[in-house]
Amino acid sequence: MLERNAVLEVVALLLIQGEKVLVAQRPKKDRLAYKWEFPGGKIEKGESPEDALIREIQEELGVSIRVLSHFKTIEHLEPPVPLRLYAYFAQLQGGNPVPQEQQNIQWIPFNELLSLDFAPADIPLAQYLVSYLNTV
Ligand code: C5P
């Protein structure tokens, strides 16, 4: 159980191939059902954000990744679940992502990213990412 005012620490994957980025849609049974997000999840006690990301992506998408660099940390501190989202660029170590938890995934072109119905913390992250991609 979360303590009052506790902030959930979460990691998110920014995986880019060509002009596309990988996004996942939360399944029906989950909080924020059908919202899109960058794949990831909760950091467990004692885990580094990088290790949490590697674990979450293996669990959710059945692939191993190499974490490249931290991009942004988004603080979404509103109830019901205040969270801090650490987003990292990474690359695949081999294989292709395959949903392991009934979520939909898609590789979406950069110029369509902001049309998705994102989970709240992922909205500013998507905006920062598009701005960044326009400069590189
Ligand atoms: O996927 P999981 O349930 O472990 O995620 C923990 C929390 O982090 C959820 O509340 C989820 O909505 C949030 N999250 C998010 N954006 C992401 C990944 C997770 O808001 N990219």
Image (cartoon, grey):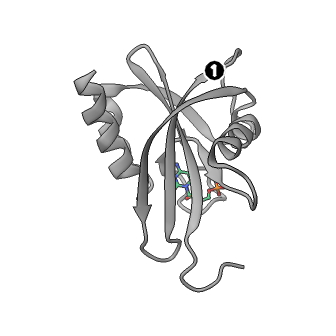
- Eyeballing the image, is 127 above or below 113? below
Residue 57 visible in rendering: yes
Q: Residue 15 versus residue 29: which sits nearer the camera?
A: 15
Label 1 crowd (10 A; few <14 / some 14-19 / many >=20) = some
Left or right: 69 with respect to 97? left
Residue 115 visible in rendering: no
Say which residue label 1 marks: 92
Q: Does the residue labelled 1 lie within 8 Å of ligand 1?
A: no
Ligand 1 - quadrant of the structure image: bottom right
Q: Where is residue 2 in the image (x, y as percent from the top left)?
A: 66, 78
Left or right: 29 with respect to 118? right
Residue at horizontal 34 percent and vertical 36 percent from the top: 129
Q: In which quarter of the image is the C terminus?
A: top left
Badge 1 element: strand
Q: What residue type is labelled 1?
A: Leu
Residue at horizontal 42 percent and vertical 13 percent from the top: 18
- Eyeballing the image, is 55 above or below 75? above
